[in-house]
Image (spheres, grey):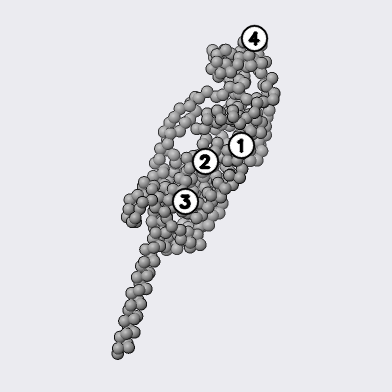
Amino acid sequence: MKIIEKILFSIAVFSITVISLLLFSEEIQSGYSKQKNTELKPIEVNNLSTQETFQEELTNQNMVVYNKEIDEAIEKYFETIKKYPELAEEEERIVEGDDSKLELANNEDNILSSQVNKDKFSLYNHKVKEGESLWRIAQSYNIPVYTLISANPKISTKIIMPGDLVKVPNMRGICYKIKRGDSLSEISKKFKTNEEEIKKVNNIVGSLIHMGDEIFLPDAKPLPTVKTIQTNMFIWPLTKKGKITSDYGWRKHPIEGIRHFHTGIDIAAPLNSSIVASADGVVIFAGTNGSYGEVVILRHKKGYFSIYAHASKILVKKGDYVKRGKEIAKVGMTGQATGYHLHFEIKQKKKQLNPFTALKTKIKKTVSM
């Protein structure tokens, strides 16, 4: 009997030990984010000691989450543009959008050399090639971007496409349409340029000009006719509202069954519903990415990134500039998904943001009057 009692006692002790280890293991896993290939990565939380405190701090965005698939895609993008300075400068111009036009107008004087032919003004029709942007075209002709835009006012509000014709001035300055009451002396003072130079490059004899005529103002810059408005940084990423099926925060993984941190929100929508850019930005990734399936990552100003996952079809490519509201993909269930939905995330640098909070973020935006 004593032997049997010892065996039963040993079994009981062993069982208690195993149960304790399992409970402890589950508690450890709750503090980790489940990643691709079942690799567990720690969630870094600033000054948080308990999960309860962590939940309270979610709306304050006071945390850093390492997401292997997304972060590696973003890091690879930055490694690429570091190798090509001209591409990096172009990306900065595109990301900053209209807000940077005036700043660029001032900065470009330091990087552009003087024109060779400044005797007479003329326009050259340039046919846009694959991969060209306004910045690259301006650089190839050694003129500022604002000079190119002044000759093609409509292109400042749209993306140029291969095959488009762009008028290229042969010198620095701006194209100007004469208004009622204008005189050459007033125009030259207003734009801080030389009246005699205006006459020379435009073949003007005397001082007679006519309303509606277009002339070129050599070495002039656009006037700062802008205003500042307050608007939402991001808009809803679907053309239709959709239903939230999984919120931001801790949850049990719907496929793997492991408790992990959900870094975005899941919005159920019919197959092939339109996914739109939540803010103006540049496509830095468009393709298949592990458990995210077909995914698009956009880079925005001030270090923001937005992620759109599980798409059935991607409608943009890496390097594209998109305005907010532009369709970029279709809703699907590629990657690890149990139904048709959009997984939507927003990051700012390394910080993971609650998408609902980010969608309420207000920014000041400078727009043309």
Where does residue 340 sit, x and y in percent of width and height? 47, 54
Disc 4 on helix, strand or loop? loop
Disc 1 on helix, strand or loop? loop
Residues under numbered marks 1 and 3 in contact, where contact means CB atoms less than 8 Å apart: no
Identify the disc placed on residue 342.
3
> Would you name the residue on which mark 4 appears?
206
Amino acid beneath label 3: Leu
Where does residue 294 sit, x and y in percent of width and height? 53, 53
Question: Which badge, 4 or 1, comes first in the chain's sequence?
Answer: 1
Amino acid beneath label 2: Gly
Furthest-top residue in this view: 206
Question: Which badge, 3 or 4, comes first in the chain's sequence?
Answer: 4
Residues under numbered marks 4 and 2 in contact, where contact means CB atoms less than 8 Å apart: no
Q: Is residue 181 visible to the viewer in this orientation of the structure?
A: yes
Identify the disc placed on residue 106.
none
Disc 3 on helix, strand or loop? strand
Amino acid beneath label 1: Ser
Q: Is residue 187 left or right of residue 142?
A: left
Foreground tag (2 vs 3): 2
Question: Which badge, 1 or 3, comes first in the chain's sequence?
Answer: 1
Q: Residues within 10 Å of mark 2 (few under 14, many from 20)?
A: many
Q: CA distance from mark 4 to mark 2?
A: 48 Å
Residues under numbered marks 2 and 3 in contact, where contact means CB atoms less than 8 Å apart: no
Instruction: Identify the residue at horizontal 58%, vertical 38% (top origin).
Output: 90
Question: Which badge, 2 or 3, comes first in the chain's sequence?
Answer: 2
Question: Which badge, 4 or 2, comes first in the chain's sequence?
Answer: 4
> Would you name the residue on which mark 2 appears?
281
Disc 2 on helix, strand or loop? strand
Q: CA distance from mark 2 to mark 3?
A: 19 Å
Q: Is residue 309 above or below residue 119?
A: below
> Would you name the residue on which mark 1 appears?
133
